[in-house]
Image: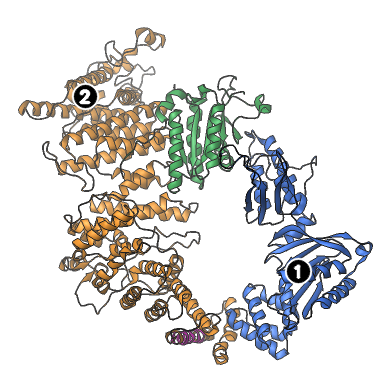
Chain colours: A blue, B green, C orange
Amino acid sequence: MDEQARAILQRILRKLPSKKTPSTLRAWGCLSAEQLEDLDYTQPKWLLLENLISKCEESGLRLKDVTKLEMVYHIENPNQGKWHAFKLTEPEDEAVSVDFTQFKEMFVAHLEEVVQHVSIRMKKQEDGAVWIRMAWGDNLTRPNHLKPTYAVHYLQTPYVFILNLSAKHKPFLYQALVLSSRHTSINEAHLSGRSLTAMRDLLMKQYQQVFPNQERTLKERNAPPSHPNIEKEHAESAERTHQMACEAFGDGTVPKLETAVYKLETRYRGSSNDTLSDRDELFRGVVKFSSPNLLESLRHCVSTGMAEAPVTPLLSSITQKGRNYFVIAEKAPGATSQTPAR
Amino acid sequence: MALLAPYTKIPEPNTATILLVESEEKFQSRLADAIVQRENDAIVNVRLARRLPLPVENSETRPRVDLVVFIVNLLSEHSLQVVENSLSHLRSDFFLGKVCFMVTDARCGALTQERLLSVKKLAASHRCPLICAEHQTEDGVAMAASRLLTLLKVSAGLSPVATTALYLSTLTRCTVPSELDED
Amino acid sequence: MAHLSNSTGLAPDPSRELLESSISGLSNRSLRVAENVRKKGEINSFQIALNYLSNVQEGTVVRGNDELERNLVVVETVALRHGLPPDAISLLLDLALSLRAGGVTCLRILKFLIPSSIVPQEAIIRGVSWLCVGKMTVNAQVLFLRWVLTVFDLIVCKDQLRSIYGFIFSFVTEENLCPFICHLLYLLTMKEHVQPYRVRKLVDIQAKMGRQPFLMQLLALYKVFWPELVTLSVPSQMRTGFKNYNSTWKAALSAVQKKARTEVTADLSLSVELKGKSTSRKRKLHHLEVPGLSSAFDTSSERKVYRLQELRSFTQLLQNIHNIELPAQMGSLLGSSLALHYLDCVQDESAFLRLNFWLGHSLQEEFLLCPEDGGLESLSEASTFLSTILSSQKFLQEGFFSTESFLYKFLSVWDGSLLRPQILDLLSHIPMMTSNYLRMFVFEPLVQLYFTSNVFFKCSVIECLNSMLLKWLTWHSVNPLEECLELSVNPNTTVTMTLSRLIDTVTELVNFVGCLATEGLHLENCHTLLLNQTLNFYETVCDMLVKYDLPLVIMPPAGVFYPALLATDSLTVDRLGYIMYRYRKNLTLAKKQEQQNEQSFHISRSTYQDFNKQLVAMVNCLWNSKSFLPGTTNEIDEHLLIQSKVPKYRSRFDLVHHPAFFKYAIEFHQKCWPERMCVDLADIKVGRYWSWYMEFLFCQGFDGLNDFIQVNTGQSSSSSSN
């Protein structure tokens, strides 16, 4: 087996937790049942790797098959690395009728036209997601499988999520995507994060949303106190703020975002500091919120009263617009607004 | 702005009402359960609030409040600020023995010691007692509840002995330790 | 590489099968055999890895070097599971610090260098020499020093380390290393190491860095050895001086030690009982563990010095008393009575200083810095720890000053229920201090706790203050303080106690308890238990002159006297009688002493007046049937008495009608006149029936009342001598 294959195998094995290794190898489907039985998953990883490599060599597996394993690994563990979301705009009429085979043929054709050496692998999942793995080479070198790009596109939706794309290859991928999905252009959706599922849920609104004037059933939070003699003074207002918080950020389990970034390009308006205010230059700053689960923490802040309710549109835009990168620019004197960054 | 007043309502017979104010709302529910379970002779009403002023809508149905307890979590600056802001919403005659301060996490290191000192100064300047509570164990919660009940019964007039809340507060009021050398 | 995997590849299969069979509970012989085979396989691979690592040359490439990685992983797994044997430690330490395998490997090795039993001294010496070479990064140097501090107790013999004290001292100028070097020096310093130039150097560094706690701690130790050399003032009681050093290894080290302990049966003769380690994984800080006295010793040491842990009997201690070396971990002395004996005899200041430092540090860490409570386990550990401290203090008959300062801090944040018996017990053992400090540190926090708590807490507090008073009085009666002589009671306080200060303090204490008792009895409606405890206290107070030779007489306040006099149970009245009887004895002795020598103390007139008033009230009440007379202290207005509609109100509290003695009167009446249906207790007061009644009453065991009545009324009871 060549060096790249070994390196990829080593990397995957190192990242896989021991409990998940058997199932992932089984899903791979390239090793026979006896070979899988033979492997001892309690050994230290470097030993297991040696055994695995020898088994692969026995079965005559090559780089192609190893990349298949890598794809299986990524599909089963989509919440790693940094994913960026993109939106395809201005669909043509045929866009709605594009099916998988059509998309695949066109995509491969377009991409191979522009890039000399590129290795593409595509897989369609049951939930309608199309996973694409690309390893880039150029005129002189073979594709580098150690730095693949992954793209996930949901057919019949305009959303694409991309992982590990370098600037050099951006235009090629964009063009291939646009053409094969029958749209006119592709734009950044200003949403990025670790968890692919979270980003997908957020954009496609697949989380528990709460609408104003909705009949609310009593949840755990507002459960009546345990004893008739105990009464909560702020029960109503707590209920109201919780309602507002859920409207802004969703109810129950929310998509797991890690950061929200606000880039300020406004003038300083505070009255405390003379040297900073009343200047014509813009006061550039960046405000970054980070948390293991950002939406849940924001919701908690609002419902416990740490942040004021009703929720400011700056924060609620995260869910309303499905993005976590904002640029706040000066629009007119005395008013700030948000404009999408170019 | 309506201040909470101690004597504007007529009390119910054999009833006492305690108001627990805590901005995080974590300790107060357990404390409320413990208080209600401990007291068998009199009826004890517990009202839980996040801050003062209390919502105006409840003022009709709310009974006369006999003891106001401000619960401060020493690990959170926000908690202390809420309490400081709430103090101005009580009428001044509440401070004649019907207000008490309770702190949790007092044993947690240097930062909490500073906040504890500020709470002590606050309590001393208002002539109120300060109770340290261990909120993590069952026993600690029970002890805190029993101490509050001792204060409550006197301030609600349910004590069998001839004593008033004001008198008890002269015995229990918090004192600020004066500056001492390294000890 | 292939052959390596083969040789270890042999083992997995049989062990997996056997694992399955062991789950079903069978204990096959083949299981053990296979285990041994597996262990041997492991040991072999470990040896091979060590061999490889010892042969690593300078300049070996580390990145991508799979072989090096593999061997390091083998050694690492063994280290984290079982700990490393001493030769492996020397080897690996050398490899790491010589930087043969690079700086990253150095840090990595240091992080998993967990010893299984002991650490050879030569390894540390060589390590220090690598430190002197100076090629290591600052991080690595700091990590090495922290590692030495963590495994310090496991280093076998430290005499060679002590001989290179000067080399270690030279690092004290490095700012990053200074805290840890100071800590290491603190553990190594002996009297001969304290030299003027070293003291000067430390003072210079202090001028640059400020009064850092680690510098102060080391200087304090130097001062203990040579007070003349260290002229600057060092606060006698300091908070924790040294930084946390062992966080990296603590969990792994304790896991390995726990494993080792369960496998080897420890020999516990006279020494410490090893406390079971807490199994809770939530406890990250094992501060409450009184460290066990380790039994490792170096037979090749030249000096014939006995370690404290080697001694097995008291006679051995006596024979070698001049030749004993204290363990490095001073906390281990707390559990062993032998060790405490030695400490007490030798009176080594440095030992006490170190012990107090460790104690203060542990107490602070456990109770005052983010304690993680919630488990019954942790609470029982805490109470055991405090009980150990208590028993050591009782054994030594004196307290540790670090427990004292901890106690004052704890009282101000106490909720009243956490570890109540231990805390109150510790409180009763505090040494005498001036009344100011007593009020500030003890009384003010106690008052706030007392009046908000229930009656049982109130009783416990009074009991605690009673035993505190008893201890002080006993101390005084054994070491009497003269008026003109200033003796320092506690060598660490800056205030010396004189007789007048002692009297002030005791007065303050007695008045405080009087106030607590008065208000407490009022609030608790004269609860019997509380009254009982209060009378216990006054039993101690009434005899201060006669029993303990302290020239002080303080009468109980009215709020204690009258509830006791008018109580509804007979024991209370009896005890009050006893107390008044003793007061009389004390006051007569005082008067006699005053008349005999002019320069003795003077009891104020008001005390005599108070006593007389109370005596008169009591006698009037019980004997003369003239309670509540106008002009006395328990005067009640005639109108109110008439309004109560009680007939013959003046005699309602005499020995016949008193609620406490009512039952006995009725019994007596029935015995005298069994046929009478109508009971008129006034009949008892007539003539000889009265003396018979007195006899009957005092046969019930009311000795105190008997004495009181005898002394004050001259009435003798013929049965009193029985």
Instruction: Please tell me how crowded label 1 is: few (under 14), some (14-19), or many (20+) other residues with Cα within 10 Å.
Output: few
The residue to which callout 2 is attached is C709
Q: Is label 1 in a helix, a strand or a loop?
A: helix
Residue stretch in magenta: C37-51
- Please name the residue shown 30% across and 19% down the image: C654
Front residue of C354/C708: it is: C354
Q: Does the magenta stretch include residue C49?
A: yes
Task: For label 2, count other residues whose C-alpha is less than 10 Å away and answer few (under 14), some (14-19) or many (20+).
Answer: many
Q: Nearer the viewer, residue A95 or A5?
A: A95
Q: Residue at x 36, y 52 (%)?
A: C386
Mark 1, residue position: A170
Q: Quadrant of the N terminus of chain C?
A: bottom right
Which picture quadrant has residue C166?
A: bottom left
Tell me residue C510's x, y (percent): 27, 32
Horizontal side of residue A330 vs C713, given as left or right: right
Decide which of C130, C40 is in the foreground and name it. C130
- Above or below, comparing residue A37 to residue C574 in the picture: below
